[in-house]
Amino acid sequence: MKTIQQGKSVSEGIGIGKAYIYKQYSPNLHASYIQPSQVSEELASFFDVQSKAEKEIKEIIKRFELKNDDKSKIFEAHLEMLFDIMIVAEVKRLITEVHHTYTYAIQCAFDQFIEMFNSVDNVMINERTADLKDIRNRLLRISEGIPESSLSTFDQPTIIIAHDLYPSDTASLDRSHVQGIITEVGGKTSHTAIIAKDYEIPAMIGVDHVFGLIKQGDRVVVDAMNGKIYVDPDAKVIEKYVNQQKDYLFEKELEKKYLTTKPVTLDQVKIELSVNISNASDDELEIESFVDGIGLFRSEFLYMDSRHLPTEDQQFGIYRKVLEKFKNKPVIIRTLDIGGDKKLDILKTPEEENPFLGNRAIRLCFDHIEMFKTQIRALLRASVYGDLWMMFPMVGSMDDINDLKQIVKEVQTELVKDDIPFSPSYKFGIMIEIPSLIMIADHVADAVDFASIGSNDLVQYLEAVDRLNPHVTEYYQSYAPSVFRSIKMVIEAFKEVNKPLSICGELGGDRVAVPILLGLGMRKISMNQASVSSVKHLIATNEMKTFEKMANHCLKLKTEHEIVRYVKSELTKSKTA
Ligand code: PEP
Ligand code: MG
């Protein structure tokens, strides 16, 4: 038995299962040539991998069709490209005339087409390069005899071991069998972490050299309550954890009973409690009757799950669906937040030294104005179907706010010209996640209809600590006094002009932070689904008076450690009182 005690737990719970090593394949080929006598053998090898690829793709299509999932269409297009006459002819030419090995020929032929598609000044054509890369990698992987790795079908309890997971990996995750996730990189607020929490899958991130520590098929226990991982544990350890897992799930079930209660404190202060969503699936929207609205719809997931930029109509359809489902309840939809940790295969962006400080979110959208306007147009068109609150991420100055207003105005003018209706009562808001805005919170509060604090980024930018870098996680202090003092300044500025302010970062669903936030005067909080019952339980079993006392005390404390210790001990007292 081996015990690993490194990394950070980002989603609580206990997972027991077999390790599944998940590595996204990336080809590493050098130029290689054959003798003219080997041409027919090489051609045969090419046709062989082509037919194996065809089989794999057909199986994927079948799986998606069984689930009535539209993603099958992406792979139908892949099938067509696999047999594309021009590409296949080029592979054959490179083998027969230039005497490339078949793998090198595949690489060169596909790369030629990728370059060609990239150089055309047409986004629709540029987007096809992601598909071509996918097919090229599939062929090359098969040629190396490496089986396809997918997270969508397991037949036993599984712990995923990966360098990192991308949103598209997690989108297809087999939730019924995945019992745990362990990754080498990531941070407390990475999207792997957020999705693990949402799916209630115990997860540990930042485990260095994880592939050296855990092998395929090893039995693994993830104790994401205490930050420990056991590899090939003995029977006693397994028994202990099977019991702890049962107790933990039992407690969670008890808390879930609070899902249906109203978020009102014992002294009758009503809190507006909303939920964060990312893909607007029917599953995600089911929570509607238990919450006051959507506090954050991370719209970038529509772009990330897709091989193509979503069209205006596709986006309109999704926004309309969410607004209709939440009729009369506020729905905050955030515009595309790409850059930083989130990359889009379909959008060519240059490598950056400091991506979190670079061309991210609205900055990137300003550079791709047509794409940006398409999203705003889709949002405005959908506004007639509900209570739309349009929110912009990564705003850093009044200039940004003015530019955004100008763009929205231009889109409105176009809609009027085209005689397309939109609701004039939609709200214009921003995320407060760059500290410069806190210094001018009064001007910001004057200029917008509402704002929401993105504490995940606020902490990163306030404390100058990369939210994903595992080597500095100890410096990423979500409960630092500076964080709460900053938030207090924003609360006061918005209170002054009587405009809505919420929080939608991870702190909004955190049992240590929520008492302080409410005590400071925050009345709107938004969180992942998984936290809703637990936060409702916290609100319904305490008085606002207690939260205010706690917040006032926390403002005087000097370190994160003191704040966490104090809040936890106060909460334990109130539980046993
Ligand atoms: C945040 O920064 O707190 C936030 C909610 O946005 P994201 O985590 O998507 O960056
Ligand atoms: Mg953010």
Image (tube, rainbow, N blue to C red):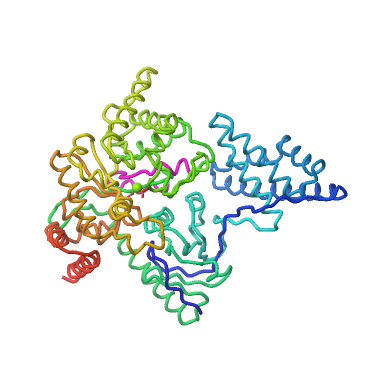
Q: Quadrant of residue 307?
A: top right
Where is residue 438 shown, x and y percent of the image?
A: 22, 45
Please state if 263 lies on the left or on the right of 303 as rendered: left
- Name the foreground residue: 359 vs 392: 359
Q: Is residue 381 above or below residue 219?
A: above
**Residue at the spot x=48%, y=32% of the render?**
311
Where is residue 426 shown, x and y percent of the image?
A: 28, 31
Report if residue 288 lies within the magenta region: yes
- Name the foreground residue: 29 vs 533: 29
Where is residue 13 shown, x and y percent of the image?
A: 39, 66
Please state if 273 lies on the left or on the right of 68 as rendered: left
**Residue at the spot x=31%, y=47% of the render?**
289
So how many labels did they put on this image? 0
* Magenta span: 283-304
Q: Residue furthest front?
A: 353
Where is residue 51 shown, x and y percent of the image?
A: 74, 47
Name the image quarter holding the C terminus.
Answer: bottom left
Q: Quadrant of residue 374?
A: top left
Q: Residue furthest right?
A: 37
Report if residue 164 lies within the magenta region: no
**Residue at the spot x=61%, y=53% of the render?**
26
Please state if 240 lies on the left or on the right of 177 as rendered: left
Please state if 65 lies on the left or on the right of 519 as rendered: right
